[in-house]
Amino acid sequence: MRGLLLCCLVALAKLTLNPRKTYEYKYEGGVNFGLGIPNLAEAAMRISCKVKITGMSDQTFSLQVSELAFQEFNGFPGKNDFNESPKLSQRIAAQLVKPFMFDYNGGHIGDIRASPEVSDTVVNIVRGILGFFQVTVKTTQRIYELVEVSIHGKCQSSYATEENAETKDMTITQVVDLNDCSERAAIYRGMATAVLDKVAKQRGESVISTVRYVYTVRPTAEGGLITRAHGLEQQHFSPFNVKGGSFKMQAVKEMVLLGMSDTGRAVMYGPMESKGNLVYKFVNAEANVPIMMQNLENPVPKAIELVKHLAEVNKYQIDSASTEDTIKLYQLLRVVPYEGLEAMWKEFAGNEEYRRWFLDMIVEVSDARILKFLESRLQAGDVSVVEALETFLLSINHLQPIPELVEMAKMFLNMPFSKSNIYLWHTVVLTYGSLVYKHCAYYTPCPINAVQPLLDLALGSLRNGSEADMIIALRALGNAGHPGSIKTIMRFLPGVAATPVDLPPRVLSAAVQSMRLIAARDPHSVQEITLSLFLQKNLPTELRMLALTVLFEAKPSMGLVSTVTTHLQDEKDLHVLSFAYSYMRSLARSSTPENHFLSTACSVAVKILAPKFGRLSYHYSKALRMDWFSDDFLIGTATEVFMLRSATNIFPTEMIMKGKYFFIGRILQILELGIRGEGIKELFGTNIPNFNGDLSFSDIKALLNLLQNWEVLPSDKPVLSAYVRASGQEVFFADINKEFMRSIISAVSPSAGKGSPLWAAVQNLQRGISWHKTKPFLIFEVRYFQATTLGLPLEISKYYETVNGITVNAKAAINPPPTEHLGQLFNSEIKLESDGFIGFTKDLWVFYGINTELFQCGSEFKSKMPLAIPWKIAAKINVREKKFELDFAPWKNEFEVFSVSSNVYAVTRNIEEPALAKMTPIMPNAVNSNQEVVHIDPTGVTPEVDQVLTPNTWNPRGKMCAESNIYGVGVCVESRLRREYYHEEYPLYYFLGETYMGVKVDAARAIKAVDKIHFEVNAGPSRHPMSASQLLETLRRLSKEAAQSSGSASSERGSHSSYHDYVMEGWDSTPEAVFNIKGLAMSGNSKPEGYDAAMYYTPEGNIQSAQMIVSQVGEDTNWKMCVNTIADAHAETKAHIRWGAECQSYEISMRGATAHLPGSKPTLKAKVHWTRIPETMAEMGRRIESYIPGMAFLLGFSQQHERNAKQEVSASVVAASADSVDVKIKFPEVSEGAFATYIVVLH
């Protein structure tokens, strides 16, 4: 007996299939997507069939599938059932009935073979079935771990075995750790420019997966036989942190042995080809767009029809209902053969509208076809430079970065057409560098041959001394971020190169910045080079500061930061000191994961440097970083601003601004702008006559006077250089030189004649112009694919598409028309009539589910955001009289200006019935909801929002309108939300459910029928009417009375300032009208209704005083607003506001001042005092009062009780030290008899 048991155990240690037997199993597999919460919609599908496995030889077996059924579920569990899909079942069965061959030895699946016509998708389904037979059994161990191949890749598996004492069957439990795979069946698309942030991954995950198998194994004489197997894969996904709520995927499969029999004579099968091993094989999914499904057969005529349709319906304005069709067109174009693309080009080339749409859409053909198409266009020269630039830029940036396409793209670097225009050449070179960067993101180590053309360009420019070629080559190498380019870049850097380097500053700047992306791939080399540059005190100041920024991009260790700190203590250049200290102080406060360790090192450095360098003036170079990060959402943002100066220049020589976005463990550098004043700094020099540095009017005047001497600028260097980087990649840079400035100034000069382009524009405007531009653009397409235990691909995708449009129709009448030069327009009256549209529609999708070319099943978030601004105006301009008039037609029909709408759906689609796709809102429709419409006047009182509450449901709806019965127009803001399980601990649920917010403009009941709305601005010399003079005299008298009253009150409180002096300053001189603005509703011969505003300016000595009077125009009205503002030379500004009947009903005064007396700390003070205010303002103030104590506590303020003014709020900010300020805010009574002063120290 013991011997028999030992034989069974030895046999069981090796799972086998008897080559002389035929096994029949029943198989069922299904997948479900939802939130896993009752009463919410879910999507699911399942496949059931019978599987017959027949032995062909000792290690070769055949597999055949029969009785296949495919079912879909879309609805609410417990209320809806699975539905049969017979057409799709037949389509899948047509391939699965064909035999499959596989090698099997000792519980391990080897090569899988099938007929050539069997698709990879169907082979993957077979892999899901065969995955049950991939089991490693060890009878000598109850619990064991090993690395083995499965459908998910090569991953760590944990086993536990248990024997049934009665049946002697063994139960084997296997858990696959998908987070511990050396070769995982998962791929990313569209994420190459988003850098992985390992520290953020430690704070939370957006995707968590678990896989478990349970086998029942019967011992036989040949080995162990699987009689039952069950597989369960669960996944939690959130666009944020899964700890805050998640979508759930559950894939379940089960296989049961129905019977076994002896195999008859061998069956011969037709030719077969190898389909690979058990690991999931990804299908080229470029055309399998997860958010829609359509028949892709015969795509050319469908694509042609769709291009024409989109062009026509968006011809004048954006048709929001059609913008989703752009994704359909992308999908069709991705399956059009190259010959079809050429045929479409011939069809559209002669029609400007169709041609533009086709070129904008073809950029999403992301394989060799688009490269061939671009090659054909550039060689033929049948596209303009602008068309070539736009198409090339988007095509290469959206190209698949595989080795074959990178090699093909090199040809554009040698095409004559590419060099026919400087901006096109820049685009070609920079874009190729971006392609190399993305290529290296997926292929490590990255081959040097990919970046070799750029290295050759850089070395060639160095040999021939071409500054322009050096800069473009270095900028392209910066885009490529290839570690193999370090040695070439070093040849441009002084003190680092093997031979002495004497290059222009802008070349050195480009060389340093070219290492910015290499910093993440080879941080040690970059740290060594940039630290060496920073420590060379003989180098230009700007270069050392740039080197420091790149050094910190490489995330230096505590030791390197300490080295920098030590050298800064002996630094003599105050600009370098100020820049380094301010940058490290900003980094010390950083909360983003990427700086988790660096911020600690910088905190120590700042404490060492602060006593000596913490008070450096803002006149020196500075670096500023502001960021935030949420662990709950795993998202954050960061903004950096660098202002580089030197001791020889008053203005910054270089300014850089960066923006970063952090999401689900990745960092995306959204936008970076840089400006370098290479030549203009020589114009400003170290001293500007009459420039004080306080950016006052006299400073602006001094700058304008200096700029008139632009002719002294050097001709051999750019005046200004600017660049733009998106997603970390430089997409554009330009130099503005002296010749360019001369051409612009001469083109717009009043003396410009008939040869000027502006003259031609004026002539065209008189004849009438009609211009239209539509730009569809797929902003991003981010996709993540992962194998599931069923052999179906799980996909998480984000699509963001925009269609922008503008239409302008205009015609001008000029009297008298210009005959010789543009200056004659200053003596003409110009009448202009125009209509048009400007707007966009943005569509966003997030898909989570199964996506194949046969069917889709999952959860889908869908959002639409349209903006539409139409116009129809008539304008009259008289430059000589400084008069401008503008007429609008009255509003007659409601139109939506802006809206945001979104919802989450359970979706199922299949290719056999694409028109019957189901999209069920994940949350059921509201049973009971009310809508409250509140009409308010322009003062803007906020209505209460109606809330309909049911268990676990939040369904607020609201509509707020502001109407003007003068102009006959109203603006409404509507909102509608529906949320389920709205709990604070689940941030994900804040965004799930129906959402709508819209701004609409509509006609309103007017006092009189409005013919037109008339605006007028008159800045010419004018004398104010007698009524205005009387009003100003009255305002003087009332202000004196208020000053005397408030002044005595201030004296009683011990005030050190005279309110009387404050109000009376500037009233002793005669006001002069500066300009007048009118906004009137015109109604036939009746008196206009509306408002009239006049501005008066009364300068006297060092006091700048201005008054504004706003009067309501119409019958039986005396409402006015009077505003008096005073600014003196002592950095003090005051304002006195009265309004109501003849400016006498209500009154508020405001005052702000700065002070920095010798021996005192810089101080900023502000005060608001009121005498009478409307009840609506008082009520708003009382509401704010109730929040003051709580907000003060949250913000860290301490509270003191003092005797403060009853109708006054004051605040003071004092610079207490180099890195802190004291803030004191005084409020009037918060409760009966209680007065509060709040104090805080901010660091």
Image (cartoon, helix red, strand yellow):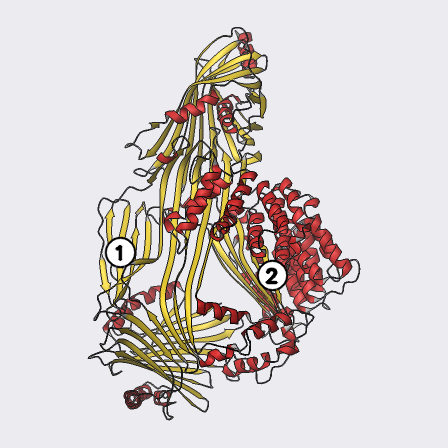
Q: Identify the amino acid type marked 2.
A: Phe
N-terminal-most mark, 1 or 2: 2
1111 or 11: nearer the viewer: 1111
Q: Which residue is mark 1?
A: 958
> Gap between marks 1 and 2, in whole Å?
47 Å
Q: Is residue 515 visible?
A: no
Q: Mark 1 touching mark 2, by CB under 8 A?
A: no
| Type of amino acid under label 1 | Gly
Can see residue 820? yes
Count of residue discs: 2
Q: Which mark is residue 314?
A: none
Crowdedness of circle 1 by 10 Å Cα count: few (<14), some, many (20+)?
Answer: many
Q: Is residue 525 above or below residue 695?
A: above
**In this rendering, position of residue 555 left or right of residue 355:** right
> Of tags 1 and 2, which is closer to the observer?
2
Front-most of residues 404 and 392? 392
Q: Residue 1193 placed where, x, y %?
A: 37, 64
The x and y percentages for residue 569 are 66, 68
| Residue highlighted by disc 2 | 733
Q: Look at the picture and state if 50 lies above or below 695.
A: above
Q: Nearer the viewer, residue 612 or 280?
A: 280
Q: Position of residue 625 (x, y in %)?
A: 53, 62
Q: Reply above or below: 552 against 1217.
A: above
Q: Residue 544, relative to residue 708: is it above or below?
A: above
Q: Measuring from the top left, give residue 370's x and y in whole percent.
A: 57, 44
Q: Secondary structure at mark 2?
A: strand
Q: Is residue 56 left or right of residue 96?
A: right
Circle 2 residues within 10 Å: few <14, some 14–19, many ≥20: some
- Residue projecting furthest to the right: 499
Name the side, left or right, on which 1000 lies relative to 584.
Answer: left
Helix, strand or loop at label 1? It is strand
